[in-house]
Image (spheres, rainbow, N blue to C red):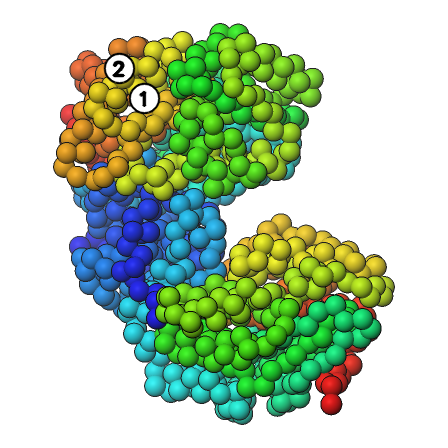
């Protein structure tokens, strides 16, 4: 299990203190305090956890927790320092995977490690709702999860162009069930056969964020074991964060030089964000007219595929009547950061406020984005707008939004 | 320090005040962290000139050091709080107050980030040329305080050429409006330009009135591959002498282009020992004409290749990589010390030859990728290893570089300022009499020596 802070010593020494990371760190840009810029975050972690020159304090933990792991700093850093990985490693070193309270940890583990436990998620949500403690933006869990309704092989309509396996992320599975359906409908309509395996778990990313690499590794490998056996052209997910987990983070968890790593890399090589894959193959079925103005919010976890952020624009442009209205900074963070916004309500709200103003300026009524956390959080903040996955948008244009996909008997 | 904390909280409130050790840690230095650090006792993040005045006059009464700070991206240690006390982080004073097309001026708070200002004026077809390479983060207050500049210096000059006035808080709490918005001013001593380059030692710059101009409609980037760095340097002098001045004229060593290629797409050729990177701007016909003239000069002087980069996007990657060269340098060396020696443009070839020879004698790697078009050479020591011996060699090299530059009629800093990093050589450049005079000026503004103590001259402070 990697993400060991000591392994990053050489890389951290490449920091020239140029401060360029101030330009894009959403937390810094909100707080305008240098403590909350990546340069300081990293050098504090190094001083405390590698060099032991400053004590570990509650405030230090707060500073290292006050990071969305959006990765903007990594993309901005000319020296290519992997600040996200360093923050994860620092959290791992601080918490040894045990940051949360016993109850929270159990909840996290049971929910993520066993999808049959989704009743617990719903119960917790209902209780929280009753006492008025549901943070604005949290997703509402459905009783009928995606995986309860849709597993098996969904055959391509017309000539088959490809076969894909579908990794269903937790958000789609329990809340955005319609996006999963949209994927099945849109893919099959475009000649792509989709296989939805049984028994999938959470991708592991929420555990990585906590620095709990052991839990992450266990969940991740469970999924890898399912996918590496499947003979498919691609593995797709509708969630950019799950995709990042498969494409890049998984290999950082797996032990080097083992057959396990080969399995991980095999699956990683086939991983695509679903819209990206569809656009890569091209639409064969022309979408119908949909008169709407839309804008596209680029999720932070985008760098794992160079075409991921262009694909939604490309496919949506093929919908007659749909007009793309770009916002000033499509790539700036919305403040959600998975569940970051729950613990940092004011900070996230401020970041979202800026995004909202940019969205308002476009005059668009629909916001497209592939990340379910962005989607939920933007929807809660922009009540007059419709926020949807690009595949939902296509499903709507095809008129198959309500269609129930049928697996092969 | 509880007393200081309580007093400051009363003045600015807890939201604008930090005193926890981790916060102080984050404010210990600028980009020259390897050179010197200092833990402040408090960081204040003012949101108004009045708050600045309240804090500074409190500090003056109580003899507490005050170090103003912009982005903390400086390359001279200018905002490193070596004597502790209060750091005044100006980044929350960040409003663009006015862009006045009729007068071709703008007014901004000191904490406005340069790139944001660029964006704002350019969206109106206007232009503010100064372009220190940290422009995505550096603040205009910091630019004025250090007389910052960048590649465009060759054609457009540096920050002070655009400053028409500043609002500043003096140590006793007085707020002055030096200069104004007029493009002509002849009223007594030019205090505006005394603040420009004062590095926070006279008071705190809180606002600036800046001159702006129409945005040149056309641009063209060209890369000239040269056989040797000497050849590149000679071309620079020739271009300046020919009177066809590009907007930017950068000299790049082969190894610089090599690391810049991680950001340039498609990558630049790597067969030259040195390169000139130019941007030519103006009207379409002017750009066409100048670009023809410059290409002819370079070809006549034996350039290996002159490549005009037609694609705007591709050209941008060159300039983005150029502005990242300082942080990129650490991907090829264990430690990097960037100097700011500037020489008269006709002396660029001699300077290059002598520095190269000196580096050869010492067995050190000295980079000379800089804004050669304005003589601002940025000689840079690139350490293969960090040890006692290398440090000794580097110190020798730096003092020799400074001597070479000064002997050619140059100066120790073109755009970074003195701060701590170059204070050792201040006397070589200015001589005792000028330093004495500067100390008297300092004394007149700041008799208690609270403003950014320890900077400019060795030991700093008032006389």
Where is residue A275, by image quadrant? bottom right
Residue A319 visible in the snapshot: yes
Position of the N terminus of chain B by quadrant: bottom left
Please state the total of marks drawn on the protein image.
2
Name the residue rendered at 42%, 28% in the picture: B254
Q: B26 or B355, which lies in front?
A: B355
Residue A380 visible in the snapshot: no
* Most distant residue in the right direction: A289
Side of A261 relative to A381 (left or right): left
Q: B393 or A409, which lies in front?
A: A409
Where is residue B60, by image quadrant? top left
Check the image and report above or below for A27 versus B241.
below
Residue B206 - label? none
Where is residue B375, by image quadrant? top left
Name the residue rendered at 37%, 66% in the picture: A256
Side of A261 relative to B55 (left or right): right
The residue that disc 2 covers is: B404
Q: Are marks 2 and 1 in contact (CB under 8 Å)?
A: yes
Q: Position of residue A322 (x, y in %)?
A: 79, 59
Name the residue rendered at 18%, 34% in the picture: B391
Question: What is the secondary structure assignment of the residue under circle 1?
Answer: loop
Question: What is the secondary structure assignment of the residue under circle 2?
Answer: helix
Q: Residues within 10 Å of mark 1 (few under 14, many from 20)?
A: many
The residue that disc 1 covers is: B341
Q: Position of residue B442 (x, y in %)?
A: 24, 26
Position of the C terminus of chain B by quadrant: top left
Name the residue rendered at 28%, 54% in the picture: A9
Q: Chain of mark 2?
A: B
- The answer for how far apart the CA atoms under marks 2 and 1 are is 9 Å
Side of B374 relative to B96 (left or right): left
Check the image and report above or below for B372 versus B121.
above
Q: Position of residue A62 (x, y in %)?
A: 33, 66
């Amino acid at each position: 299990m990697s993400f060991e802070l000591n392994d990053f010593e050489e890389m951290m020494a490449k920091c020239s203190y140029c401060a360029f990371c101030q330009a894009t760190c959403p937390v810094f840009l909100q707080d305008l305090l240098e403590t909350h810029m990546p340069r300081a975050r990293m050098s504090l972690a190094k001083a405390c956890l590698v060099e032991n020159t400053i004590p570990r304090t509650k405030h230090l933990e707060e500073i290292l927790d006050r990071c969305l792991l959006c990765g903007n700093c990594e993309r901005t850093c000319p020296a290519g320092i992997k600040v996200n990985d360093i923050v994860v490693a620092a959290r791992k070193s601080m918490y040894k995977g045990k940051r949360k309270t016993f109850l929270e940890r159990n909840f996290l583990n049971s929910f993520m490690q066993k999808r049959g436990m989704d009743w617990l998620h719903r119960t917790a949500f209902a209780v929280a709702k009753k006492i008025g403690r549901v943070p604005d933006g949290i997703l509402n869990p459905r009783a009928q999860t995606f995986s309860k309704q849709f597993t098996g092989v969904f055959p391509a309509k017309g000539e088959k162009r490809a076969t894909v396996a579908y990794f269903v992320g937790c958000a789609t599975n329990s809340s955005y069930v319609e996006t999963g359906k949209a994927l099945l409908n849109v893919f099959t309509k475009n000649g792509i056969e989709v296989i939805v395996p049984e028994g999938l778990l959470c991708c592991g990313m929420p555990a990585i964020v906590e620095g709990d690499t052991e839990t992450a590794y266990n969940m991740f490998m469970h999924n890898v074991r399912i996918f590496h056996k499947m003979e498919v052209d691609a593995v797709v997910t509708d969630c950019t964060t799950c995709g990042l987990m498969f494409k890049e983070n998984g290999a950082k968890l797996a032990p080097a030089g083992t057959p396990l790593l080969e399995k991980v890399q095999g699956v990683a090589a086939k991983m695509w964000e679903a819209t990206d894959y569809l656009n890569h193959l091209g639409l064969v079925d022309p979408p119908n007219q949909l008169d709407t103005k839309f804008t596209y919010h680029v999720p932070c976890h985008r760098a794992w595929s160079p075409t991921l952020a262009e694909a939604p624009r490309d496919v949506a442009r093929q919908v007659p009547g749909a007009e793309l209205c770009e916002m000033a900074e499509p790539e700036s963070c919305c403040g959600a950061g998975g569940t970051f916004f729950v613990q940092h309500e004011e900070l996230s709200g401020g970041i979202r406020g800026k995004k909202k103003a940019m969205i308002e300026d476009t005059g668009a009524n629909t916001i497209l984005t592939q990340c379910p956390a962005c989607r939920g959080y933007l929807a809660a903040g922009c009540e007059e707008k419709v926020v949807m996955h690009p595949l939902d948008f296509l499903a709507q244009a095809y008129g198959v939004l309500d269609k129930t996909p049928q697996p092969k008997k | 320090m509880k007393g200081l904390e309580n007093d400051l909280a009363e003045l600015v409130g807890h939201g604008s005040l930090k005193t926890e050790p981790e916060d102080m840690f984050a404010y210990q230095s600028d980009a020259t962290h390897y050179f010197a650090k200092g833990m402040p006792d408090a960081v204040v993040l003012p949101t108004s000139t009045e708050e600045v005045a309240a804090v500074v006059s409190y500090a003056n009464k109580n003899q507490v050091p005050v170090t103003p700070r912009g982005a903390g991206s400086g390359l001279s240690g200018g905002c490193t709080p070596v004597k502790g006390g209060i750091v005044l982080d100006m980044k929350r004073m960040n409003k663009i107050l006015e862009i006045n097309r009729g007068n071709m001026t703008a007014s901004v708070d000191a904490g406005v980030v340069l790139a944001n200002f660029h964006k704002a004026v350019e969206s109106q077809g206007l232009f503010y040329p100064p372009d220190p390479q940290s422009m995505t983060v550096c603040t205009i207050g910091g630019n004025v305080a250090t007389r910052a500049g960048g590649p465009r210096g060759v054609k457009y000059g540096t920050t002070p050429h655009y400053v028409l006035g500043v609002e500043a808080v003096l140590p006793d709490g007085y707020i002055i409006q030096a200069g104004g918005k007029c493009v002509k001013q002849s009223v007594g001593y030019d205090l505006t330009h005394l603040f420009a380059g004062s590095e926070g030692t006279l008071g705190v710059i809180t606002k600036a009135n800046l001159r702006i101009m129409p945005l040149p409609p056309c641009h063209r980037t060209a890369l000239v591959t040269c056989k040797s760095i000497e050849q590149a340097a000679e071309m620079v002098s020739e271009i300046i002498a020919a009177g066809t001045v590009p907007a930017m004229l950068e000299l790049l060593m082969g190894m610089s282009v090599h690391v810049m290629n991680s950001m340039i797409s498609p990558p630049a050729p790597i067969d030259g020992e040195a390169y000139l990177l130019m941007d030519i701007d103006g009207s379409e016909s002017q750009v066409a004409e100048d670009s023809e003239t410059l290409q002819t000069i370079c070809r006549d002087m034996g350039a290996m290749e002159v490549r005009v980069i037609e694609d705007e996007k591709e050209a941008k990657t060159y300039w983005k990589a150029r502005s990242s060269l300082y942080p990129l340098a650490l991907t090829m060396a264990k430690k990097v010390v960037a100097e700011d020696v500037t020489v008269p443009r006709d002396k660029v070839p001699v300077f290059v030859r002598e520095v190269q020879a000196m580096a050869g004698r010492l067995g050190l790697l000295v980079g000379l990728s800089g804004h050669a078009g304005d003589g601002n050479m940025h000689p840079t020591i690139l350490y293969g290893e960090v040890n006692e011996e290398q440090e000794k060699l580097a110190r020798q090299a730096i003092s020799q570089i400074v001597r070479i530059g000064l002997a050619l009629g140059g100066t120790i800093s073109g755009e970074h300022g003195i701060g701590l990093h170059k204070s050792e050589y201040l006397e070589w450049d200015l001589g005792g009499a000028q330093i004495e005079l500067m100390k008297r000026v300092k004394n007149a503004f700041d008799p208690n020596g609270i403003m950014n103590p320890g900077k400019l001259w060795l030991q700093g402070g008032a006389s």
